[in-house]
Amino acid sequence: MQAKTVLVSAAIGVGLGTLLLPGVALADTTVSPATTPVGGTVVLTATTCDPSSGDAIFRVTGPDRDQNVRSTTAAAAGGLSAELFTAGFTLGTYTVAATCGDGSPDGTATFTVTPIGGAPAGGRGDGDETGAIAAGATLLGTAAGGALILARRRRHAVTAAATL
């Protein structure tokens, strides 16, 4: 009975994934490179926007920005693109949301502005590591639970073999 339940659950998961994946794959905005120093240039690309329907608008939001950037060229691989010069940007992560000329969304992407010459000074993160700690604790708990189940199954198998 349990094997049937697992198979049905897996089939439902695969079916939903198959239905939802094409919709996710259609909307695609990219930023290249994903990390740039202050004063660098990133290329914003809305890959599924049709150039004949008008310009794409890239909304850039972050630590000190909430601005729109209009596409300037048709991208070589398809879609529309624009260049963004990051002079005067505050260090941090920025989100880019693209909207095609026909009003349809084209997804989001992020990029990070770093100091000139490398990564930001200081530690690995912003000091709030609770998410990483929670993920690690969850993984440890899951591993311990799996080891306990495996040990109990082996004990039952050894007991059953000894009685035969």
Image (spheres, helix red, strand yellow):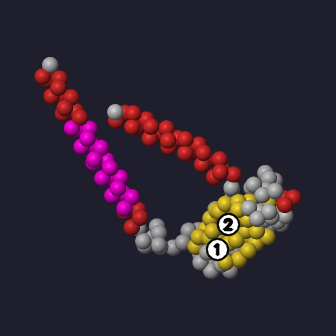
Q: Is residue 10 magenta?
A: no
Query: Taking 161 as reference, is 152 above or below it?
Result: below
Query: Taking 90 as reference, is 80 above or below it?
Result: above
Q: Which residue type carries mark 1?
A: Thr
Which quadrant does the N terminus fall into? top left
Q: Which residue type carries mark 2?
A: Ala
Q: Is residue 113 left or right of residue 142?
A: right
- Of 87 and 143, nearer the camera is 143
User: Percent position (x, y) of residue 50?
Assistant: 81, 56
Q: Main secondary structure of the magenta part?
A: helix
Which quadrant does the C terminus fall into? top left
Residue drawn 46% across and 67% down?
Answer: 124
Query: Taking 65 as reference, is 95 above or below it?
Result: above
Question: In which image quadrant can residue 16 be found?
Answer: top right
Q: Is residue 138 magenta?
A: yes
Visible in this render: residue 43?
A: no
Q: Are marks 2 and 1 in contact (CB under 8 Å)?
A: yes
User: Percent position (x, y) of residue 9?
Assistant: 44, 41
| Label 1: element kind | strand
Q: Residues within 10 Å of mark 2 (few under 14, many from 20)?
A: many
Tell me the residue that label 1 is attached to.
61
Residue drawn 80% across and 63% down?
Answer: 102
Disc 2 to disc 1, how far (Cα)?
9 Å
Visible in this render: residue 143?
A: yes
- Of 106 and 33, nearer the camera is 106
Q: Which residues are magenta?
A: 134-152
Farthest residue to the top: give it: 164
Residue drawn 19% across and 32% down?
Answer: 156
| Label 2: element kind | strand
Tell me the residue that label 2 is attached to.
97
